[in-house]
Amino acid sequence: MGRITVSWLTPPMIIHLGTPLKCGILEVSHFHKREYSLSIKTPWRFSCQPAYAASHHLARRRNLDLQAKGFRHQKMSSQVIQKTESNVVVEDYFQNLPLSTSYEAAMEALTSLITSKKRGDNSSVGGKYGKLDRMRMYLKILDLEECIVGLKIIHVAGTKGKGSTCTFCEAILRECSFRTGLFTSPHLIDVRERFRIDGLDISEDKFLHYFWDCWNQLKEHVTEDLPMPPLFQFLTILAFKIFVCEQVDVSIIEVGLGGKKDSTNVIKEPVVCGITSLGMDHTEILGNTLGEIASHKAGIFKPQIPAFTASQCTEAMDVLQEKADELKVPLKVVAPLDHNKLKGLTLSLSGDHQLTNASLAISLCKCWLQRTGNWNKQFQDVSSIFFFDIFCLKTVYYLPSGFFWFLVM
């Protein structure tokens, strides 16, 4: 019997037949006789090799293809790195590149956006315009400025656990039958991992369609004061473009770095904001104290928009609360799930810290459901929901349509 590779969380995981399956945010056992699936929307596929081997094999093949065409493969991340001379050549090359829909060309185009600006350098890449001003101008060029208001966004910042919290949120709301869009960073193998629709990486065809649409429109408006956006800005813009065009019901957006000046902070009115556990990170940009770092993270707070935070140290919590009071933000501190009261149920991501991330995701999702008017729609028919267990203030529901244990507070 072959193995089953599940396209679920990054990194990919191998699951042998007959073992408990990780579904949603809780690990449960459920098997169909003829077809194995995490949900109706997430089919499995049989593979004769481990997921890691398959992914690296594909990456190696793509790298060899690029080398054969004279291109040098370069791994991209959300971090700013030094631009090499070859990248300058690539950038000049793409200024005269005819319309192309090849994936390799798109990757080289993205590589040309890697900036030479070093961390801690606060000078503006775009002449007289600041980062967020440029972001708004880019969105206006693409006619996205007003459209992103309708994305019903969950915006998440923090030092540790942003990606996990966002992934939990996506799993919960997708299993509630909402069309989900998830934007996270960085990627492991393929840049398309950053853009997930209904729990799956965006397809290569759709990625290319939206990529070249954004690229060509922005290229037409390049000036000395408004150059092409750096890599992470472009990917953020692309995420908004994808989610608007794909008409998702909810967009879960992970902050790239900090919060206040992050490219994602062009979001004017999210439905709810979340702050994961804070620690010392990117001190050359965010500051050398937890208070300074918390100030940057709290920059995603919007007037009167509810926010939730994991438990923080006093220094960080005081800053978050001060910012919340200033903007009249109802800020609530979320306690971790009690592992002892889960009665054997296991989260689909390992580690005790995930109890905090899952609890934060639960609060964010419940708030999102309430503020978008979907809470009563989902739970008004008590007979359709099988009550499973109660621990503290948390309840486990069974949604028959998705074979999914759903936690709510």
Image: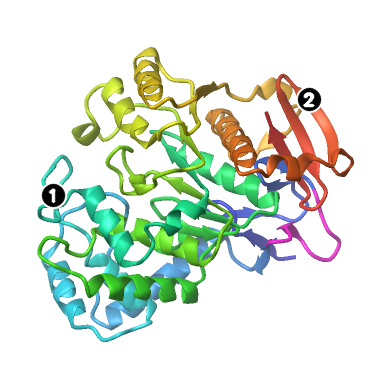
Q: Which residue is mark 1?
A: 124
Q: Quadrant of the C terminus?
A: top right
Chosen colour scheme = rainbow
Prevalent SS, magenta region? loop
Look at the picture and state if 282 lies above or below 218: above
Q: Is residue 288 left or right of residue 31?
A: left
For residue 329, what is the image quadrant? Answer: top left
The residue depicted at 35 percent of the width and 44 percent of the height is: 265
Q: Is residue 366 magenta?
A: no
Foreground of the two, 404 or 362: 362
Residue 72 visible in image: no
The residue depicted at 26 percent of the width and 70 percent of the height is: 218
Q: Quadrant of the N terminus?
A: bottom right
Foreground of the two, 101 or 273: 273
Q: Tell me the kind of residue under disc 1.
A: Ser
Give the label, 1 or 2, closer to the camera: 1
Q: Which residue is mark 2?
A: 390
Measured from the top left, where is residue 131 in percent x and y? 22, 49
Residue 39 visible in image: yes
The residue depicted at 28 percent of the width and 54 percent of the height is: 135
Q: Is residue 32 left or right of residue 151?
A: right
Q: The magenta stretch spans which residues? A: 30-41
Q: Is residue 35 magenta?
A: yes
Q: Is residue 357 left or right of residue 137?
A: right
Q: Tell me the kind of residue under disc 2.
A: Ile
Measured from the top left, where is residue 266 in percent x and y? 34, 48
Residues at marks 1 and 2, CA–CA distance in whole angstroms: 53 Å
Foreground of the two, 102 or 74: 102
Say what secondary structure mark 1 lies in.
loop
Look at the picture and state if 137 lies above or below 256: below
